[in-house]
Image (spheres, helix red, strand yellow):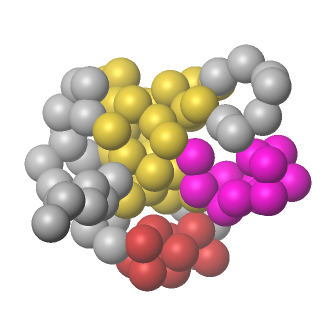
Amino acid sequence: MIPAIGGSVLVLVDPEQNGGQDAAVAFITAVWPDEAVNVRVFPNTPGPEYQLSGVRLYQTRQGALAGQRGGLLSAYPVEYLQAE
């Protein structure tokens, strides 16, 4: 995925702060030269959305999980299902 402003990603978050889910939808709001991004996160809770900076993008959920274990804010592309 080539990051671009307005792109949608899933950001790994604390499930307790996201209705029991470990990923929340986010939109890219800035792209940095090192390919880190800023995102606006929309949690699955009644609370407001929030901003995260310096999020690393990975091609897969597994890559993002590995990055998160390394202490990085991590995200991966939203995978859209095609109707048959």
Q: Is residue 44 left or right of residue 76?
A: right
Q: Residue furthest right?
A: 16
Left or right of 59, for residue 41:
right
Is residue 45 visible in this depiction of the protein? yes
The image quarter in which residue 39 lies: top left
Residue 5 on the magenta span: no
Name the residue located 56 percent from the left edge and 32 percent from the top edge: 41
Residue drawn 80% across and 23% down?
Answer: 47
Q: Position of residue 74 (x, y in %)?
A: 49, 58
For this orientation, the residue located farthest to the front is 84
From the image, which quarter does the N terminus lie in?
Answer: bottom left
* Image: 62 above or below 83: below
State which quadrant residue 45 falls in: top right
In magenta segment, residue 21 = yes
Q: What is the x, y in percent for residue 78? A: 33, 53
User: Which of 57/27 is in front?
Assistant: 27
Position of 15 with respect to 22 (left or right) is right
First to last magenta residue range = 13-24
Closest to the observer, 35 or 49: 49
User: In the picture provided, is 62 more to the left or to the right than 70?
Assistant: left
Q: Is residue 32 visible?
A: no
